[in-house]
Amino acid sequence: MRTKGAVSSYSVDMTGDLEEVTPKCANEKNTTSEVDETDINQNDPAVVQFIASLVAHSAIREKCVEFGFQNLGFSVKGGSDVLSELTGEIKQGSLWGVMGPSGAGKSTFVNVLLGKIKQTSGSIHVNGIEGHMRKFKKLIGFVPQDDIILPELTVRENILHSARIRLEVSWTESQIQQHVNALISCLRLTHVQHSLVGDVSKRGISGGQRKRVSIALELAAAPKALVLDEPTSGLDATAALSIIRLLKALCHQGVTVMCIIHQPRAEIFQALDKLLLLSGGRQVYLGDRSRCVEYFETKGFTFPRHCNPADVIMDIISGHGSGYSHSGPSGPVRTLVQIIQDWERIQPGPTTVENQALAHNQEQVNLSAELNTYDQLRGASWSRQAYLCLLRGVKQQTRQTTSFILEISVGAVAGLLIGLSVYKIEGLLFQGVFLHPFELLSSATNYTLVPELGLLCSLAIGLAAAPPGVKAFGEESIYGLASIIAVITRREDGPLMSMIVSLIIGVFGGYGPPLSTVQSWHLQWFWYMCPGTWLSEAYFNEHTAPFSYLYDLEAAAAWTGYTIGRTNIDLCMLLVIGSVYRLIAYLALVVSDWKIPLQ
Ligand SMILES: Nc1ncnc2c1ncn2[C@@H]1O[C@H](COP(=O)(O)OP(=O)(O)OP(=O)(O)O)[C@@H](O)[C@H]1O
């Protein structure tokens, strides 16, 4: 398709890439020299070893995940457009950079592509088939801007855990270990591999090292496509370049890599193959990085000698390009709005793209089905994942000695206080009506103290177990209730939320209002859904049973509403309710994963 007006010296292919039809721009020699792609990492034995490990053990390695988007838009309530009319193809084996000023919509674009949020208009296709990248989520890695590394584990343990959980089951333990060794070495993390990651409260590795570990967590899973949100931020120049070079080496193996990059230094910019430039949620350029400078020159901009072209481009697409402008072949210099409009004019029409997609349809359907099967094969078995997470959890817990002791102490102190509260009555917790024929000799009864202690115990257990459960184990919590809380709240709010919910649930123990009153309301089914009722019933049963020779326990049971003589059932029900909580948490996780339906 031929372009109009100022861009008449270019053509746009079906993918929206610019094809050069004029001689190379004279100014290009002014920019920093190109990175020799053939040289990239070829001398780095660690990279060679890592790539070899990927190639040797990844099934259907020749298959890839490519994606495209057409007229993609995302608007927020109230109607403002965060993204509008984005169209393009992200092909395999190329290193993509997504650039734009702050607030341009880069993160939103990535989130929409990954299916984390749903677009409000347009479509996304993966390998030519309409749908989200979520369909292949085990094959696609995402490195968020904020890392999600576990601070209580070492660098190596974090990476190893990711590899063991996410790689294909066919990988043996020694292959995984070698793969992780090579990856650690590639990312220059060997010297800190046994250091704890740490966090703000306990200093561990540096910020740049953390960044590399979060990239390693995704690379360990041998992804077919990788999306990174600012992989080079916080890194020194050498480390940043070495990461980009590793990503480039991955691209050479057919992995599709897309990075959001804020202000790349010249060498990093030169290493990118393709660029997507956004401004105010609209597309300014999509195509070869090497032709980007030339493209803007046709719009009347000059790239000063010895200047980082990325800086100039960022200035232009931030609306501060007037310092670089002159009257070009297309007349007076273009404003940012005009540049965006120019780009929209040269986009391939929807019909052309649809026809192209249809032409490859059968082949793409087959590839999609094959990748889907491959996606299913990824990851350790359910039981192995549970085992690995348990080991990881135990390791985390044992490394937090202070908080572990504190948590145990909370339980112990709660128990001590409960004991002290009844210390004076010297174990006389229960007093009933004497058995027939001595009932007339009975003095006052005390049916409430045992249920009251049962309530206090449930509260103490809940309060002591839930917050640490959420803190240490997150979604894989050992404490049933906390696992639900962990799913529905933010991790940092989890401990407080679980404490509140534990308090509320704990009150449903049959002490106040008594279970017998609840029964008269026909609401005992609800109380029996709460673990506190079963715990209090067991507690009541065990405290009263020794007095069966003396007191009328049937009368006590009728007064309190508890069923006596079934401690085993009470304990089993506690186990069942805990398991049901976990099941609900699991279902909530699955449902939240399906929140955005696959198209
Ligand atoms: N769900 C939303 N509700 C309201 N506004 C939103 C929503 N999502 C994104 N935005 C707005 O859209 C704009 C683009 O946000 P986005 O985070 O994608 O930008 P960005 O280019 O990644 O910025 P930065 O480089 O600073 O991270 C911002 O102004 C943001 O406030």
Image (cartoon, grey):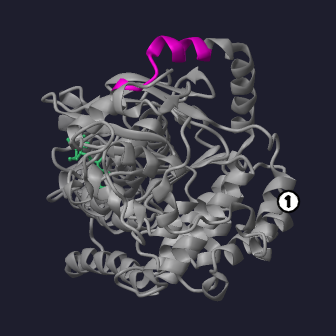
**How far from the left and from the top, in percent, is residue 373?**
74, 31
Q: Is residue 78 above or below residue 324?
A: above
The residue lying at 65 percent from left, 65 percent from top is 246
Q: Within the image, what quadrant is residue 444 found in?
A: bottom left
Tag 1 secondary structure: loop
Residue 175: image quadrant is bottom right
Q: How many marks?
A: 1
* Dominant SS in magenta: helix
Assess disc 1: are there few (<14), some (14-19) or many (≥20) residues with their C-alpha within 10 Å of its C-alpha: few
Front in this rendered view, residue 90 or 398: 90
Residue 321 located left or right of residue 241? left
Horizontal and vertical percent for residue 495? 30, 63
Of residues 488 and 261, the one nearer the viewer is 261
Q: Is residue 356 magenta?
A: yes
| Residue bounds of the magenta highlight | 345-357
Residue 394 seen from this side: no
Above or below, 306 against 128 in this view is below
Instruction: Say whether residue 390 is left or right of residue 233.
Output: right
Q: Answer with left or right where residue 40 lies relative to residue 529.
A: right
Let me know if residue 104 appears in the view.
Answer: yes
Q: Which residue is mark 1?
A: 172
At a point 21% along the width and 41% down the height, the residue shown is 332
Tell me the kind of residue under disc 1.
Thr
Membership of 152 in magenta stretch: no
Q: Residue at x 69, y 73 (%)?
A: 186
Residue 559 percent across, percent down from the top left: 22, 42
Closest to the observer: 56 or 514?
A: 56
